[in-house]
Image: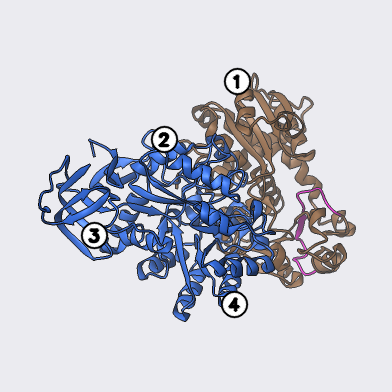
Chain colours: A blue, B brown
Amino acid sequence: MKIHIAHGRVIDPISQRDEQTDIYLAAGKIVALGRCPAGFSANRVIDARGKLVIPGLVDLSARLREPGYEYLATLESEMVAATVGGVTSLCCPPDTDPPLDEPGLVEMLKHRAHGRQQTNVYPLGALTQQLQGTRLTEMGELFDAGCIAFSQANAPLVDTQVLLRALDYAATFGFTVWLQPQDHYLSRGGVAHDGEVASRLGLPPIPSCAETIALSTILQLVRETGARVHLCRLSSAKGVELVRAAKAEGLPVTCDISINHLHLTEHDIGYFNAHCRLIPPLRSLRDRDALRAGLVDGTIDALVSDHAPVDVDAKQLPFEAAEPGASGLELLLPLTLAWARDNRLALTVALDRITSAPARILGIPAGQLSPGQPADLCVFDPEREWVVTPTTLKSQGKNTPFLNLPMLGKVSHTVVGGFIIHEDARA
Amino acid sequence: MFNPQLTAEGHLKHLLTIEGLPPAILFQILDRATEFEAVARQEVKKVPHLQGKSVFNLFFEASTRTRTTFEIAAKRLSADVINLNVSSSSQSKGETLLDTVDNLAAMQADMFVVRHAESGAAHLIASHVGPNIHVINAGDGRHAHPTQALLDMYTIRHYKQRFENLRVAIVGDVLHSRVARSQIHALTTLKVPEVRVIGPKTLIPRNVDRLGVQVYHDMVQGLKGVDVVIMLRLQNERMNGALLPSRDEYFKYYGLTPAKLAHAKPDAIVMHPGPMNRGVEIHSEVADGVQSVILKQVTFGIAVRMAVMSILASPPSSAARA
């Protein structure tokens, strides 16, 4: 399959390219930008006039809910959501049922996910057996089965001795460990930021120090072990400060935040909107602004959807009882564009956070548009407005704080490995 | 912000929280309660305001006093009252909260009085029910207990006549108290110039000053010159653990004794939403003393709940005529 994407505005964060040009794809690779290679004859020409052509999105956290939670979402529905959202590579956390703690489970998932041409799936293996935080998993075996790194997802790892050993063991093989910094005891029972809104609504609070204390512990153990750690879903200004200092010190850490925390604050909870029940909790405006600044200056490397489909019934409960999480695969691109618009950011910078930066964290050949690279990319109309509704979302998870809000930017084509896996004629 | 408890015309549709209600509605309820207070002194303690209406007392959390006063209030308004202790029935069979509500709504309920252990439950139900059903929050988690706060305001007005010159202290476990939150909103809405909260740091929520109150950790300082002392109940499970070392130490520093009360104004009234823990947050001598109005609160509670129900049940046009 040879594809010619014509007249699009091509943005490639790594090369800082932002110009109207043509891209030529063949045999699953990008073969040329600009001039047509000699002898290239396209099977298919995509007219990208007025559209943007960017590397396919790399999402560091998308729950596909398989195995175990197929009633919430199926691999099929969520893979469609990914392609509609322009996501060409994604990481799925190990908090499935059972957790991804055995090579067989990972192989099964990879097999199911790679059954046809679709978004590349990179499973994260469980760091401890059953995610219980006591015994290490067979990281080597899991790696061979296809795990790209190891994580506890949102499960607590209370025992610091186990954490130290997990980091040491992972470092032995050069594996990266992904940790969501949240102190188990300080967050126990809590559902909202320890601020004005929680005090007003009577919601059990989670103080920011739940994050900074966990971060301090992790960073100290990174110093101790030299392990590479990716910090997932920061939420607080003080957390950003700690990561900034750790990076200045030269510690091998990277980090991400979610689209929800980039755009929302505790005040969006309003009158107990269960769609804003998230882990970690939405914090104050000052925290939100610090996360935005950190994402601009690169302290925060990547922006993720933190996609978590939740059943309608599990959200139609009092805020405390509602299941945490938000659907996000289809919102990652438009919410990145909205952030860029709000902050007058160059698209080369904003798009880096959802393409090249997460690809670098994963160490995968993705997130860039240059000859020889895999032909993973997406084409979108930046001006196309659409409204987030249960019908427009393809994910089985209709749970998002952005429900019924207008979005600007819609993907018209998603290409993975040189195959057009999504095409929206109207976009 | 959009207020889910008011109609587009600004009339009360549900009573979920005091927060966001205009002073006029609070006064409307207090004034109506004054009318109903007389009903209790009649030979026949009944008025026809809710005749033919069905009031469902939907209690997902155990309660005796609140449920009983709501039941009496509804019966005095001639409503049919159905008491449901849901914690022991459908919820244990796995039915969801909203399914329970839907089923009761299908039985032509006109009003739900809801108590639930989780903050926001009443809001959830109100957002779910049809337009002809009214929801009264009888306590949700740590969030709100608006009728309790209204009866407290009624009591304060009864003894002090007005609000604009008062100093009020709320003492105890503010952190876990839906009563305290609703009282704070009611007092500030009614323009009480000085509202104080008194308690150890473990029981005072952070940022509570944003609600317009002053925080005191020293009870004697906090009681100086106040007109109203509101004691909060300290639940047994909070007494021994990481929040407080012991009930004795709590009583020593935050229990209301005659000696501590002497720092308030001589005509200060003492209130408590009940049920009281004598010897934990309040000394019996104070609870039964001349300054205590605790039992009057209970009596007023019926009139105030009648007022809320009758205002909710009457369409705005007839309310205007009344």
Using the image, tell me which numbered label, if any, was put on residue A370: 3
Tell me, yes or no, whether the two marked residues, 4 and 2, touch with CB atoms within 8 Å.
no
Secondary structure of the residue carrying numbered label 2: loop
User: Which residue is drawn at the image coordinates 37% and 40% (left, top)?
Assistant: A388
CA gap, disc 4 and disc 1 = 63 Å
Q: Chain of mark 2?
A: A
Q: Chain of mark 1?
A: B
Using the image, tell me which numbered label, if any, was put on residue B141: none
Which amino acid type is marked by label 1? Ala
CA gap, disc 1 and disc 3 = 63 Å
Residue A240 placed where, x, y %? 47, 70
Which amino acid type is marked by label 3? Ser
CA gap, disc 1 and disc 2 = 27 Å
Which amino acid type is marked by label 2? Pro
Q: Is residue B267 magenta?
A: yes
Residue A269 placed where, x, y %? 51, 50
Q: Earlier in the sequence, mark 4 or mark 2?
A: 4
Residue B241 placed where, x, y %? 80, 62
CA gap, disc 4 and disc 2 = 48 Å
Tell me, yes or no, whether the two marked residues, 1 and 3, touch with CB atoms within 8 Å.
no
Q: How many marks?
A: 4
Q: Are marks 1 and 3 on the same chain?
A: no
Using the image, tell me which numbered label, if any, was put on residue B106: 1
- Magenta range is B262-277
Residue at the disc numbered 2 = A390
